[in-house]
Every structure is written in structure tokens, then in C-alpha cells.
């Protein structure tokens, strides 16, 4: 009943908001029309595209959009918003079920429901004709599947079907949006947490520390590439995305507002300057507040992110109060959050924060577990 109430509330909101479009809607629509014109011949379609991010990485979304346009016709935008709502329903159901299963706590379940109702980023984008909400659904179900593997009993007969489902979703995510890569990293870690459980549990802290170090190394290498691409890219031809990023870093572009305008900071002229700009992008990516937000937008964001971030930290700090399955869930979800933040900080950011949507289900589950860690007494040494 709680889930049905959340799903219905989002449906009502999407209906009242009406169909909305973003800057990328036009590009996606054009790609879909071209794919239809090519008779859904993917190879022929891809040969004619010239974009600094390979269109192959959007192919799952473009095929879906082209199919919807072919079947639905003029009402294709309304159909995509309806699919957004269905995707939200599937993802939110999975997340709430995972919270109930992982915590066995009414308080944690109510917290998760409350966070969904305060998730301003989701409320903003559910009526948009973009790929973000459908990708959010894919990511949410994958995160739920990963947590199922991490927390299931060793003899759980659902482990193999769950692993197959998650693997299929991850493969689809990799050709749905470029941001499918962090989901792939999460899935590898989730499989490890299930099938090599002993070593994973013993070295959990080292795994997190190693991931943090690798993130810093990636940021440093990325900074070197965008400042001196010829000297630090040993794999032949430099991908065009790094050429674009190099120009943006040297121009001090923090994020893309529109094709005609950007938000700028101090240009990055050195390796350290590029690392500083990436750090600024990290802060922008995770911030719950910006001066451009309205008072209502700010209050809704604070209602979500303050408990979400605070209880995520609590889950990390109080892992010794949790049972082993909950500790494993915390580790894999934290690694996903880290990979998403770093991945997007190294690439381009949009001003509207839609790229951080996949963080929200992970933060909701972490906050629910964090609440349990706060409510439990500390173990005696």
C-alpha cells in the first residue's frame, strides 16, 4: 500500500505537470527518426552518425524511442512519459522491497517512503521526454538485484536467476546511456560479494579504501590527459570526448547550461588546476542547494539530501553495529555512489542535476540501513 501511494502520487504529479521536453529531446528524436528511415538497420544508422560521444552508447534508448514512435505515432511523447512512470513504479517497488527485506524495520521503510516523496530530482524529471527516468528504473532494479545477491543466504535458490536478470540489465544499460559504466562496476562488485563472500567480508574496508585510491588516480590521470593529451594517452587515437573536455577545462567550463551558454570558473592551465576543476564538479554534482534554486526547490532538496547523506555516513561509520548482509549491502552501494560521482565529474555535467538520478535509489537504501545502525546499540568489544 505504501508503494502504491508513492507510485500514484508520482503519476498524478506527472499528469498535472504535462509533457515536457529538454535540450536533448530534439537530438534523441532526430536519431530515432533516422533509425526509422534506415528501416531499423542499426549498422547503416551508426555509419552515418558523427557525434563526440559514440551513438552506439545510446542505442538501446534510440531503438526504444524509434519503436515507440513507429507504434504510437503522434502521441509518442505522452507514451514516453507513461514509460517513465512505469519505470519509476518498477524501480521504487524494488527499492522499498529491498529496504523491507534488508532492514526488517517499519521505521526504515517509512523513511524510504518519505525520501521518495521528497526526491525533488525525480519529481522534476518524471514528465520529461528524456532517457533519464527509464535509465533510473534500470539502475534501480539492478541495484536491488545486487543487494539481493549480497544479502541472500548461500543456499538461496533465487541467486542464479537474480544474477542473470542483473547481468542482462547491466548489458542493456551499457548501450542505453554512457553512464551505464558505473552500473557495470557495481555489478561486478555485487557478484563478488555473493560468490566470493568470505574474502569480500574480510577485506571490505580495504576494498573501499582501494576504490577511493583508484578514484584519486583516475582524477589525476584525467587531469593530465585534458592538459597534455598527447603525453598521457598511450592507446593510440585520443577519443574525441577528451578533446572536447580539454577545451572545456582550459576555458574554465564547469558545466553545460545550454548549447549556447555555460557556467564558468577559473580556467585550468595546469595539472593541479584540472584536478581543482574536477573537485569543483564533484561538489556541484552532490550539492543539494544552488543560489538559482527557488525556496521550495531548496527545501525539498534539503528534506531529501540532509537525511540521505547523513544516514549514509552513519551506515558507513556504524558498520560494526550491522549484521553481515547489511554490511555487504553498505559496501556495494557506497562503491556505486563513489563510481557515479567520479565518473560524471570526469565528464560533462548538465546544470539540472539529471545525471545524479541513479544515485537516489542507492542513497535511499543506504539511509534506511543507516537508520538501523543508529537505532542499534553499539557492540561491546
Image (cartoon, helix red, strand yellow):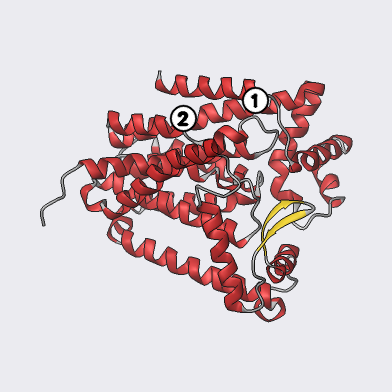
Residue found at x 35% / y 33%? 111
Residue 171, given in percent of the width and then of the height, sits at 59, 45
Q: Quadrant of residue 79?
A: top right
Give the side of residue 27 with respect to residue 204, left or right. Answer: right
Q: Earlier in the sequence, mark 1 or mark 2?
A: 1
Query: Alpha carbon of mark 1 to alpha carbon of mark 2: how far?
Result: 16 Å
Which of these two is toward me, 144 or 112?
Answer: 112
Residue 231, given in percent of the width and then of the height, sits at 68, 81
Residue neighbourhood size for the residue with mark 2, other residues' Cα within 10 Å, grouped as few (<14), some (14–19), many (≥20)? some
Residue 149 seen anywhere in this rendered image of the structure: no
Give the side of residue 103 with respect to residue 343, left or right. Answer: left
Above or below, 120 against 381 in this view is above
Q: Secondary structure at mark 2?
A: helix
Residue 218, given in percent of the width and then of the height, sits at 54, 68
Q: Looking at the figure, which quarter contains the C terminus?
A: bottom left
Residue found at x 60% / y 35%? 124
Above or below, 310 against 160 in this view is below
Q: Quadrant of residue 264?
A: bottom right
Above or below, 273 against 368 in this view is below
Residue found at x 72% / y 68%? 251
Residue 183, given in percent of the width and then of the height, sits at 53, 49
Which mark is drawn over residue 131?
Answer: none
Give the labeled residue for mark 1. Answer: 17
Which of these two is toward me, 293 or 28?
Answer: 293
Q: Secondary structure at mark 1?
A: helix
Q: Quadrant of residue 148?
A: top left
Residue found at x 51% / y 72%? 217
Give the labeled residue for mark 2. Answer: 117
As drawn, which residue projects farthest toward the left?
380
Amino acid at each position: 500500500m505504501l508503494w502504491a501511494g508513492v507510485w500514484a502520487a508520482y503519476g498524478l504529479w506527472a499528469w498535472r505537470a504535462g509533457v515536457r521536453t529538454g535540450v536533448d529531446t530534439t537530438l534523441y528524436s532526430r536519431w530515432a527518426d533516422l533509425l526509422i528511415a534506415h528501416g531499423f538497420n542499426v549498422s547503416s544508422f551508426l555509419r552515418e552518425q558523427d557525434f563526440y560521444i559514440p551513438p552506439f552508447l545510446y542505442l538501446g534508448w534510440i531503438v526504444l524511442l524509434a519503436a515507440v514512435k513507429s507504434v504510437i505515432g503522434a502521441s509518442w511523447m505522452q507514451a514516453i512519459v507513461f514509460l517513465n512512470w512505469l519505470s519509476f513504479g518498477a524501480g521504487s517497488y524494488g527499492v522499498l522491497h529491498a529496504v523491507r527485506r534488508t532492514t526488517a524495520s517499519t521505521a526504515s521503510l517509512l523513511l524510504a517512503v518519505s525520501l521518495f516523496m521528497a526526491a525533488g530530482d525525480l519529481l522534476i524529471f518524471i514528465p520529461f521526454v528524456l532517457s533519464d527516468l527509464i535509465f533510473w528504473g534500470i539502475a534501480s532494479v539492478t541495484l536491488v538485484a545486487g543487494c539481493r545477491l549480497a544479502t541472500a543466504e548461500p543456499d538461496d535458490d533465487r541467486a542464479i536467476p537474480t544474477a542473470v536478470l542483473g547481468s542482462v540489465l547491466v548489458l542493456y544499460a551499457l548501450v542505453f546511456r554512457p553512464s551505464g559504466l558505473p552500473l557495470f562496476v557495481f555489478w561486478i562488485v555485487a557478484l563478488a560479494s555473493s560468490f566470493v563472500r568470505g574474502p569480500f567480508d574480510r577485506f571490505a574496508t580495504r576494498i573501499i579504501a582501494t576504490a577511493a585510491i583508484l578514484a584519486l588516480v583516475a582524477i589525476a590521470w584525467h587531469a593530465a590527459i585534458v592538459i597534455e593529451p598527447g603525453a598521457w594517452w598511450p592507446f593510440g587515437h585520443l577519443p574525441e570526448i577528451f578533446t572536447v573536455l580539454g577545451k572545456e577545462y582550459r576555458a574554465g567550463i564547469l558545466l553545460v547550461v545550454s548549447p549556447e551558454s555555460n557556467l564558468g570558473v577559473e580556467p585550468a592551465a595546469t595539472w593541479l588546476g584540472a584536478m581543482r576543476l574536477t573537485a569543483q564538479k564533484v561538489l556541484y554534482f552532490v550539492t543539494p542547494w544552488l543560489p538559482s534554486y527557488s525556496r521550495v526547490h531548496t527545501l525539498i532538496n534539503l528534506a531529501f539530501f540532509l537525511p540521505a547523506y547523513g544516514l549514509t555516513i552513519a551506515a558507513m561509520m556504524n558498520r560494526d553495529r550491522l549484521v553481515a548482509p547489511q554490511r555487504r549491502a553498505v559496501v556495494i552501494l557506497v562503491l556505486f555512489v563513489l563510481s557515479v560521482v567520479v565518473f560524471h565529474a570526469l565528464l560533462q555535467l548538465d546544470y539540472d542535476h539529471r545525471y545524479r538520478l541513479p544515485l537516489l535509489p542507492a542513497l535511499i537504501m543506504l539511509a534506511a540501513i543507516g537508520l538501523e545502525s543508529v537505532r542499534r546499540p553499539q557492540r561491546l568489544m
